[in-house]
Image (cartoon, helix red, strand yellow):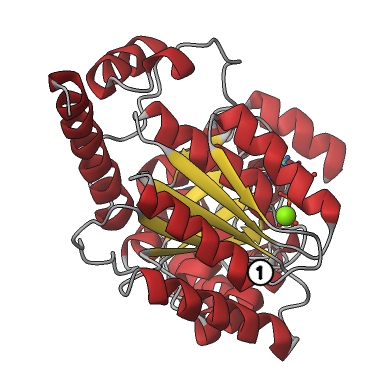
């Protein structure tokens, strides 16, 4: 081993540890730098993946922009109820109830927020009261313990068909690559040839390697081969894509359990991270899906995809309150870099920062 090899190894490990800590513990170390200059500095520190990540990429969609539809729907309706009202009387509360229960927050969260609104001293105070309570709800979700990191760090990605798994894997792979880590993705969704090809395209975009089987093959065997290959070649991260036929089918859950079991044969404490991908467009259905998946597999955190295209982004609150598993990432677009780490405070701020542009959107959609 040359001096350079050793250096590369150490740098890779430092990056892996900080990335992993950020993933597991929600710590602020190695947070994805949002500004190009800071990203460049981080890359400089990360070393090995410098060349790849130095390639220019489009400016990613920001959270405020991603939440516009949700904000226009929820805040727009609230504005209409509260505007010009002097008293927080039964009439206003009944209207607020209608808005909150129609906002795809989940029943429990709608009730909770209605109670918070009811405790406000005047209609003018309702928005602040809701904002404060929303933040509390998100902060009440327990954050997972920081664990020892392994190499390879094995990530299992689960969720129903079309929720955004494959796309999100591309985005996750790109983040880890930009931190200087080597990434291998495993095409364990073997049901459709197109699904394997789609993952191949994302792997190429992200600069990750791909392990695939033949269409119709055994998903667990693909996952096993991928982990074996990653170990043999000392790669840092393995991300396993899975099939997502209806979550109500016992077959799917059994298959996920089987994949996890087979991977353990190679790495006993794997998977180190199980990510559940949910589609924000499905609103309260996402809460139900999360409950079913968390019963079958040990989900560490949730990636809520397609927040940009939906007015149902308030479901983040319902997920926090009714599922109790942290939302770790949000997808805000179809590009490689349209993934954000979810942080309660900026999220709530973006959700409540209603402005003239939102008003125009709300007028167009709510009328
Ligand atoms: N607007 C938007 N579209 C997304 C996002 N994530 C995924 N998609 C789209 O959702 C569709 C299904 O995604 P895919 O990754 O194939 O889902 P899978 O079946 O779970 O693997 C694709 O058309 C993606 O482009 C997102 O964050 N925002
Ligand atoms: Mg897929």
Q: Is residue 62 left or right of residue 364?
A: left
Note whether 367 is above or below 101 in the view shown.
above
Q: Quadrant of residue 270?
A: bottom left
Residue 135 % position (x, y): 38, 56
Can residue 57 be seen in the rendering of this structure? yes
Can residue 75 be seen in the rendering of this structure? no
Note whether 352 is above or below 12 in the view shown.
below
Q: Is residue 43 left or right of residue 116?
A: left
Residue 47 % position (x, y): 28, 19
Between 255 and 58, the one nearer to me in the picture: 255
Residue at the spot 21% in from the left edge and 33% down from the top edge: 9
Q: Quadrant of the N terminus?
A: top left
Q: Is mark 1 within 8 Å of ligand 2?
A: no
Between 137 and 212, the one nearer to me in the picture: 212
Between 136 and 171, the one nearer to me in the picture: 171
Q: Quadrant of residue 298?
A: bottom left
Residue at the spot 29% in from the left edge and 57% down from the top edge: 24
Residue at the spot 29% in from the left edge and 69% down from the top edge: 142
Residue 282 % position (x, y): 74, 63
Residue at the spot 71% in from the left edge and 79% down from the top edge: 247
Note whether 65 is above or below 345 in the view shown.
above
Give the residue pinned by disc 1: 219
What residue occupies the far bottom of the structure in this picture? 250
Between 57 and 129, the one nearer to me in the picture: 57
Task: Say which element carries label 1.
Answer: helix
């Amino acid at each position: 081993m040359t001096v350079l090899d050793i250096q590369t190894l150490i740098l890779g490990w430092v990056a892996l540890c900080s990335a992993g800590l950020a993933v597991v513990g929600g710590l602020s170390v190695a947070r994805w730098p949002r500004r190009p200059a800071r990203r460049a500095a981080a890359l400089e520190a990360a070393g090995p993946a410098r060349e790849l990540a130095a390639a220019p990429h489009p400016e990613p969609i920001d959270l405020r922009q991603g939440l516009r539809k949700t904000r226009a729907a929820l805040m727009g309706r609230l504005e209409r109820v509260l505007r010009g009202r002097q008293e927080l009387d039964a009439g206003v509360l009944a209207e607020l109830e209608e808005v909150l229960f129609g906002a795809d927050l989940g029943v429990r969260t709608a009730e909770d927020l209605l109670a918070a609104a009811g405790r406000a001293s005047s209609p003018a105070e309702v928005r602040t009261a809701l904002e404060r309570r929303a933040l509390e709800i998100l902060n009440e979700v327990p954050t997972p313990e920081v664990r020892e990191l392994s190499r390879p760090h094995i990530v299992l990605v689960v969720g129903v068909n079309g929720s955004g798994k494959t796309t999100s894997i591309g985005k996750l792979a790109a983040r880890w690559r930009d931190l200087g880590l080597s990434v291998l993705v495993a095409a364990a969704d073997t049901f459709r040839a197109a699904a394997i090809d789609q993952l191949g395209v994302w792997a190429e975009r992200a600069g990750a390697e791909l392990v695939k089987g033949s269409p119709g093959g055994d998903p667990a065997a693909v996952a096993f081969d991928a982990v074996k290959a990653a170990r043999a070649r000392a790669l840092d991260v393995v991300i396993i894509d899975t099939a997502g036929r209806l979550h109500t089918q016992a077959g799917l859950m059994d298959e996920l359990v089987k994949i996890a079991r087979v991977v353990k044969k190679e790495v006993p404490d794997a998977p180190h991270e199980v990510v559940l991908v949910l589609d924000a467009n499905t609103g309260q259905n996402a809460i139900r899906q999360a409950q079913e998946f968390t019963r079958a597999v040990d989900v560490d955190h949730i990636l809520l995809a397609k927040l940009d295209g939906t007015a149902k982004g308030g479901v983040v609150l319902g997920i926090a309150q009714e599922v109790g598993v942290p939302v770790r990432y949000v997808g805000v677009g179809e590009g490689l870099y349209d993934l954000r780490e979810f942080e309660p405070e900026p999220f709530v701020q973006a959700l409540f920062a209603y402005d003239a542009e939102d008003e125009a959107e709300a007028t167009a959609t709510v009328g």
